[in-house]
Image (spheres, rainbow, N blue to C red):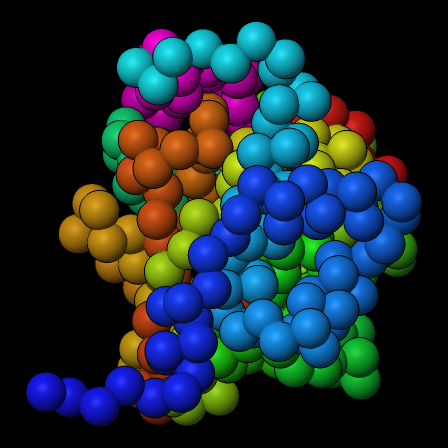
Amino acid sequence: MAASTSTGTQAAQQAVTPQLRQWIITQAQAGCRPEDVLAAMTTAGWNEDVAIRALEETMAQHLAAQAAPAQPARAARNDQVEAASTPVPEPAMGGEPTRLWAGDREVQVLMSCKLPRVVLFGGFMSDEECDQLVALATPRMARSETVVNLTGGSEVNDVRTSDGMFFQRAENELCERIERRIAALVNWPAENGEGLQILHYRPGAQYEPHYDYFDPSHPGSATILARGGQRVGTLVMYLNTPEAGGGTTFPDAGLYVAPRKGNAVFFSYDRPHSATRTLHGGAPVIAGEKWVATKWMRQREFN
Ligand code: PD2
Ligand code: ZN
C-alpha cells in the first residue's frame, strides 16, 4: 500500500463544514481580505489546498446567491448559460469583403471562421507603428502576471512566461490612433476597451491555452466585472515576425495563426462559456522573439 504524505492525509481528513463556510462569509462581510482569511485558516492548521478550495467555493456560492436570490434548478442553469448571449464586436463582413476600411487605413481580410468567431487581418499596422509601440513599451516591461481567481488581483505564474506592460487608454498619440482604428474595424466603442497590453516572448516562452473572459463563478471576478462588464472580444496584434513558432493557437478549432508583423487576429465570445470555443494560447517561440499588443474589449465603458 502506498504511504500517504502527512499533508495528503491532513487534506483528506479536513472536511469543509457549514460552520466553516459561515465563518468565511462572516469574515468577508466584515471586510477581511481573502489573503488574510486564508492566512488565518492555515495558521489554525488547515491544509492550504483545502483552505483555498473552501474559500473559492464558499465565496462563489455566496456571491451567486446574492446576485440571483432564487436559484434555478441545475438543468435550467445550464440552459441559461447556453442561451445568455451578449452583443459582441464584429467587423462588417457582409458581402465577404477582401479589404475593410478601418477609419484611417485599409486592412486586408485574410481568414474568417464562424465558430469560434475568428477573423485574421493583414496590414492592420504599419512596420513603423509596430516598431514605435515596441520602443515605447520596452523601458516599462516586467514579468507578466495572470489574474488570481480567489482575489481578483494578479500574480506571476508559470502559464505565462512572457514579459509585459499596459498602456493607459489613449496614453499617447499612437495608442489613441490604434484604439480608434480597432474601434472602426470591429464596430465597438473605443471607450469599452482596456488599455493596450504589450507582451514580449523570448525563445521557449509561451502563454498556455486559456479563455480571455472572466469566469463569473470565481470570487475574484466580481471586482473585475464591476469595471466595464465582461470581456467580449480580443485583438492580438503582431508587432514583429518571430523566426519560428509563437503562433496564436485555438485548440478547439485546430487553428494555428502564424505571427506576421502588422497582422492582427480578432476573436469574440458572446458568453463566458467554453461553447464559444475561444480557448486559445500563445505557442512557444522556437527561434527569435515575439512581440504582440493585445486589446481586450468590454461590454461597457471601461474606466
Ligand atoms: O501572444 C499571443 O499569441 C496570445 C495568445 C493568447 C496573447 C493572448 N492570449 C492574450 O494576450 O490574451
Ligand atoms: Zn488570451
Say which quadrant the C terminus sits in.
Answer: top right
Could you tell whether 152 is left or right of 106 in the image?
right
Say which quadrant the N terminus sits in.
Answer: bottom left
Q: Residue at x 63, y 44 (%)?
A: 19
Judging depth in this view, the residue of 151 and 141 nearest the camera is 151
Judging depth in this view, the residue of 102 and 61 nearest the camera is 61
Q: Is residue 264 above or below residue 274?
A: below
Could you tell whether 173 is left or right of 156 in the image?
right
Q: Is residue 256 above or below residue 246?
A: above
Residue 36: tell me if it is visible.
Answer: yes
Residue 251 pos. (x, y %)? 23, 54
Could you tell whether 275 is left or right of 143 in the image?
left
Q: Is residue 173 above or below residue 84?
A: below
Residue 294: tell me if it is visible.
Answer: no
Q: Residue at x 41, y 55 (%)?
A: 210
Could you tell whether 28 is left or right of 199 in the image?
right
Magenta part of the protein: which range?
76-97
Q: Residue at x 30, y 31 (%)?
A: 275
- Dominant secondary structure, magenta: loop
Q: Residue at x 53, y 47 (%)?
A: 17
